[in-house]
């Protein structure tokens, strides 16, 4: 269905015209391709909406969280038991983090599958990789803050990989600062450094999406090209759809939070391993069993390197998956290995890896 891009500017009401004159809101009525409104092409937008939920709930939690190692766990117990809506807000923060980790990975797979990283969108692929690193960084730093057994073990793995990395890992070691404990610095990373990096990357990401338009549909003969200013739909329609899915996401996250509040274990004991990592890091467990803590550096570095090679290796202009069989088969194989590793790790008993 074709939608007019010439609807009356600011509507008929005086308020509408007043707002239009000052804010130029009708500028968001530019043309976008119809396929941009389908769910696979809204996964990035859903992730963005999730980040807004995380920022709002995170600001609330930061009013009560104590980032000193001696008080951290107690302050989380206080959030759960003593703060108005503390348990619910913490659970929404927890479940949204789980949800956006999934949607950002699915968004990346969509971009990979549809060849949307190809010329002229290569730079946005790399900005996306930056966003992925920031997202995983936020999840990791967030998971250590509660300072229960799971968190203390994650922190010990962090310290061990920092030692292996030497000078490169100095910031992640306890010795980096004599005046501020590692947990407090990781909280700084979680609440200031990483959100700032997120803001920079997402601004670049959205700017580049606007510059190039969304990639064309991957029809058998379709070739990569810019699409800005083209399409049968409009950006305001796309935005409404994005907000709709975002609100649905919030509903799901709210239901999960009420049914399954975010877990909190006992205060952590240093030097033992009694828990397993969260699902997004769990697949590394078998590699760690095999190679020790250096697997936590080597395996993500190899995967990151392969993702960085994607736009360099696959440069033909076709978008159809049939014409990109080698790259997609390789990616599918790696995905299967990761999923199998995750299942093996879930079934494996907890093991001592540290030291
Ligand atoms: C916090 C993480 C991210 C957010 C919030 C985000 C947001 C978005 C949004 C809103 C779009 C518009 C279309 C869509 O939703 O599919 C988009 C497109 C795009 N994203 Fe992301 N993104 C993120 C991570 C990534 C990652 C990890 C990659 C890949 C490594 C990536 C690469 C791209 C590319 C290449 C496009 C253009 C796609 C096209 O034209 O079809 N993004 N992103």
Image (tube, rainbow, N blue to C red):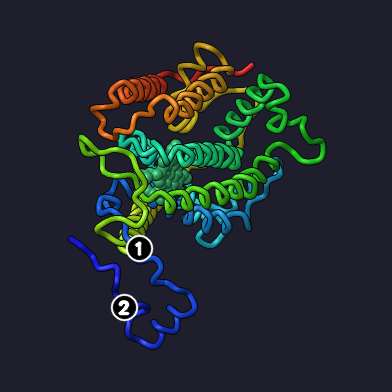
Q: Which residue is mark 1?
A: 30
Residue at 41 percent across and 49 percent down: it is 212
Distance between mark 1 and mark 2 Cα atoms: 13 Å
Please report the residue visible at 58 percent of the width from the left and 17 percent of the height from the top.
Answer: 294
Neighbor class of circle 1 (other Cα within 10 Å; few <14, some 14-19, many 20+) is some
Report ligand 1 position as a quadrant: top left
Could you tell which of marks 1 and 2 lies nearer the N-terminus? 2
Q: Residue at x 63, y 58 (%)?
A: 63
Q: Residue 43: where, in percent of width, then height?
A: 35, 47
- Can residue 232 be seen at all in this image of the molecule? yes
Residue 12 vs 203, above or below: the answer is below
Q: Is the CB–ligand 1 distance for label 1 below 8 Å?
A: no
Q: Return the x and y of residue 222 as percentages of the image width and height.
A: 25, 38
The residue closer to the viewer here, 219 or 35, is 219
Task: Tally the marks.
Answer: 2
Q: In the image, residue 277 lies at what x, y percent?
A: 49, 29
Residue under the point 20% across and 35% down: 220
Q: Is residue 95 left or right of residue 145?
A: left
Q: Residue 314 location in percent, x, y?
A: 38, 27
The reply to whether the C-beta atoms of the residues labelled 1 and 2 are less than 8 Å apart is: no
Up-down relation of residue 157 to residue 41 (above or below): above
Q: Secondary structure at mark 2?
A: loop
Residue 8 badge: 2
Q: Answer few, some or many: residues within 10 Å of disc 2's Cα (few below 14, many 20 plus, some between 14 and 19).
A: few
Q: Is residue 7 above or below residue 54?
A: below
- Image quadrant holding the C terminus, namely top right
């Amino acid at each position: 269905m074709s939608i007019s891009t010439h609807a009356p500017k600011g509507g008929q009401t005086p308020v509408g015209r007043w707002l239009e004159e000052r804010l130029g809101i009708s500028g968001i009525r530019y043309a976008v391709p119809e396929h941009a409104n389908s769910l696979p092409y809204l996964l990035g937008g859903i992730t963005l909406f999730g980040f807004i939920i995380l920022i709002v709930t995170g600001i609330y939690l930061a009013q009560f969280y104590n980032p000193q190692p001696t008080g951290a766990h107690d302050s989380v117990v206080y959030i759960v038991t003593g703060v108005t809506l503390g348990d619910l807000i913490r659970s929404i923060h927890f479940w949204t983090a789980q949800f956006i980790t999934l949607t950002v990975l699915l968004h990346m797979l969509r971009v990979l599958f549809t060849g949307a990283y190809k010329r002229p969108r290569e730079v946005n692929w790399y900005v996306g990789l930056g966003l992925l690193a920031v997202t995983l960084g936020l999840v990791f730093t967030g998971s250590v803050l509660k300072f229960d057994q799971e968190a203390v073990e994650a922190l010990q793995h962090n310290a061990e990989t920092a030692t292996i990395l030497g000078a490169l890992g100095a910031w992640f070691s306890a010795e980096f600062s004599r005046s501020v404990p590692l947990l407090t610095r990781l909280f700084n990373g979680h609440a200031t450094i990483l959100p700032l990096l997120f803001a920079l990357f997402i601004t670049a990401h959205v700017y580049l999406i606007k510059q190039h338009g969304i990639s064309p549909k991957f029809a058998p003969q379709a070739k990569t090209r810019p699409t800005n200013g083209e399409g049968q739909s409009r950006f305001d329609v796309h935005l409404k759809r994005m907000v709709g899915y975002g609100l649905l996401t919030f509903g799901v996250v709210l239901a999960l939070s009420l049914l399954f509040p975010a877990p909190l274990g006992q205060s952590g004991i240093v030097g033992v391993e009694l828990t397993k990592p969260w699902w997004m890091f769990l697949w590394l467990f078998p590699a760690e069993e095999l190679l020790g803590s250096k697997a936590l550096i080597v395996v993500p570095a190899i995967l990151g390197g392969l993702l960085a090679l994607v736009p360099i290796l696959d440069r033909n202009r076709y978008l159809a998956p049939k014409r990109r069989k080698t790259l997609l088969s390789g990616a599918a194989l790696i995905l299967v290995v990761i999923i199998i590793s995750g299942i093996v790790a879930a079934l494996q008993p907890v093991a001592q890896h540290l030291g």
